[in-house]
Image (cartoon, grey):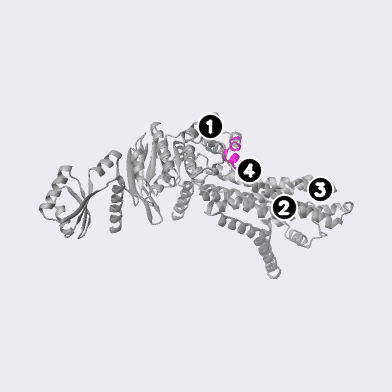
Amino acid sequence: MAMPSLRIRGFWRNPLLRKELRQRMRSYRTVLALSLYLIVTGVVAFTFMYVNVQGQTLLLQPTRTAELFTFLSYLQLALISFVTPGIAAGVISGERERQTLPVLLTTPLSPWSVILTKWLTSISFLILLILMTLPLYSIVFLFGGVVPSQVLAVFVLQFITMGAIASVSVFWSTFVQRTGWSTVLSYATVAAIFIGGTVIGYLMDTVAAHAPDQTMWIDLGTAAYTINPIYMQASLETSLGFITPSFSNSLISSVFNTVQVHDLMSQPAWLIYALFHVGGSLLLLVLSAWRLRPGTFHAFQKRIVRWFIR
Amino acid sequence: MIVTENLCKKYNKVEAIKNLNLNVRQGTVFGFVGENGAGKTTTLSILATLTLPTTGRAYIGGVEVTTDAPHVRRLIGYMPDQFGVYDDLTVKEYLAFYGTAYGVASSLIEERTKDLLQMVSLSSKEHFYVNSLSKGMQQRLGLARSLMHDPPVLILDEPASGLDPRSRIEMREIIKGLRERGKTILISSHILPELADMCDEIGIIAHGTLVACAGVEVVNARVQGQKQLFIEVLAKGNRLADHLMTRHDVTDILVADERHVEFLFSGSEEAQVDLFRDLSVHEFAIKSFREVGSSLEELFMRLTEEEHVSSLSS
C-alpha cells in the first residue's frame, strides 16, 4: 500500500489538475473575472473610506477600520456565494456537454481523483480572487484596529464556506445533465442556506415569542442560524471585537443581536458549523464520485435496495 | 481477445441488447454493423467500461469488464462516435495529457506523440490549438489519443462518421496500418463497403440481436453466390412469380406484381441461360430483364429487415 505522502505527491502530479489549471489560466474570462472582482472590491472599499472620512484620512479611527474590515469581509462573502456556483456548477456537466467526459472516464484516473481535482481547481481560482484582495485589507492594517491573525480567522471561515458551496455545485454538476440546471440548483441550494436559513431562524424566533414552550423553537432557530455563514461570520467578528452594539450599520447590528441571543459564539455552534459544512462537503464529493462511474453508483443503489428488502 | 457472453442491456423497459455473443480473435479487425439504434454504441460502451450490462459478461484479453474495469481501461483505446476536444490546449498538450493520465512515462510521451502525429499526418499541427482543427483532423487526433498508451485493443465507434470521402479513405488506411501492427480492432460503422475492405470478420446487429456473424470472405461469398434479378413483363407478373418459385435455383421472390418480378437467383451462368429459355417456352411476355447489383449493403438491409419483421410479429 502506498504511503499517504506518496499519494499526496501523486495527486499533485495529477495530469487533470495541471490541465485544468493551465486551461483556466489561459482563458480571457479568467483575466476578466479577476479584473472585475478587484475593481468592484476596490471601488467599494475606497468609497466606504471616502464617505467615512470625507477625504481626511487622519479622521479614520481604528473602530471605523474595524467596520471597514467587517464591510469588506461581508462583501467578500457575498461575492464568494455568487461566483462559486458560476465556476463550479459546470465542471462535470460541462465535460458532458462538450462530449469529453466519456473519454476521460475511460482513462485510469479514479472518479474520486476526477471529482477532487475539479473541486480543487474551482476553488483555487476563488482562492486566487481572495488573495488578490489582500492589498485592500492591508489598507485596514495601515490604519490599525485589525491584526493579520484576525483577518486569517475570517479567511479560514470563508474558505470553509467556499469549499462547501463548491461541493454543492460539483454535486449538482455530476447529478444533472445540463450546466444550466446545475447552476440553477446550485444557486437555489446556496439561497436556501443563506436566505432560507435566515427566514426560518426569524420565523422560529417569532413563534418562540408567542409559544408556551419556547426552548424547542429557540433551538430550531439556533440550528438554522448555526449553519448560516452570514451569522457565523458575524459570530466570529463579534468574538474578535469588530462588531459591537454601537456598530453603525443597522443590518449588521441586527445580525449581532441574533448572534448574542442565540449564543452563536459558543463552541458547540462552531462545531456544528464545521461539521455541517466540512462533513457535508465530503459527503457530497463522495456521492459525486459514486455517480461519476456508473458501476460504483449502481452497485451502491443495489446494495441499498437489497438492504431495504431484507 | 474480445468476448461477450449473453450480454443484455435494458434501459427501463427497452432492450438495447439481447443475448449478444461476440468473439473477436486477437490481431483481427471486427466490423460491427447495424442501423442507428441497433445496439452498436451500447455494446461498445459496455466494452469501454462506461455502461454496465443488465446481465451477461464481457471480457477483454480475458479480463472481466465489470469486475476489473481499471485493468480493462489500460488494455483498450476507445474512440466514441462523437467526442469533443478541450479548448485552449495544443495538439501536443492534448496528447501529453492523455499519455500522463494513462501513466505513460514522461520520457516516452514526447517520442510517442511524434510517432502518432506522424501516423495520423498531423505532425505539422503539433502546436495548433485542438479546437482550431477540422473535423477530420480531430477524428484522426482522437485515434492518436486512443493509441497514446499503446493498447492491444482498439474500440472505435463509427470513426469515419461525418468525414468527407478523402478523410474517410485516410482513416481507413490508418486502421489498415494498425491491423498490420497486430492490434485487435472492434469497429462499428454503417458504411459497409468500407468495412468489407478493412475487416476480417463482420457482425450484423439489428434490434439488439446479432443476426449474422462471419468472416468477410464468407459474407461476400454469400452475397456473390446469389444474384438479384429483375424482370419486367407486359402482364401476368404474379403467375411468373409462381412459376419461378417452382425452380430450385430461385431462392426468394422479393417483389412481385402484375408487371414486375424481382427475385434472388442462386444458379450458375448456364442455369441463367436455361431460365430465359424456360420463360420463353412458357410464353411469358418479357419486356426487359436486368441484374440488380448485389452487395454487402443489400445483405445487411435484408437481414435487418427480416429481424425487424420478426420483432414486429413477436
Q: Are marks 2 and 3 on the same chain?
A: yes
Local crowd size for mark 1, using a 10 Å CA cut-off: few (<14), some (14–19), many (≥20): many
Start-end of magenta stretch: A9-25
| Residue on which the image places disc 1 | B109
Label 3, secondary structure: give it.
helix
Q: Secondary structure at mark 2?
A: helix
Determine whether, in the image, residue A195 is placed left or right of residue B143.
right
Whole-percent x and y of residue A167? 60, 50
Kind of residue at badge 4: Arg
The residue pinned by badge 2 equals A76
Give me the chain letter of mark 1: B
The circle drawn on residue A109 is none
Looking at the picture, tell me which residue is in the foreground, A202 or B83. Answer: B83
Evaluate whether label 4 is on the same chain as label 2. yes
Query: Magenta: predominant secondary structure element?
Result: helix
Label disc, if present, on residue A26 of the rendered structure: 4
Which label lies toward us, 1 or 4? 4
Report the Cα–Cα distance between label 1 and label 2: 43 Å
Instruction: Give the alpha-carbon distance from disc 4 to disc 2, as whole Å.
Output: 25 Å
Image spot of residue B56 (x, y percent): 36, 46
Q: CA distance from mark 3 to mark 4?
A: 31 Å
Q: Secondary structure at mark 1?
A: helix
Quarter residue B188 falls in: top left
Q: Residue at x 62, y 50 (%)?
A: A87
Chain designation of label 3? A
Evaluate whether label 3 is on the same chain as label 4: yes
Q: Nearer the viewer, mark 1 or mark 3?
A: 1
Single out the residue that lies furthest toward the left: B281
Q: Please provide percent x and percent y for residue A59.
A: 89, 54
Tell if the residue under mark 1 belongs to the same chain as the one under mark 2: no
Residue that mark 3 sits on: A139
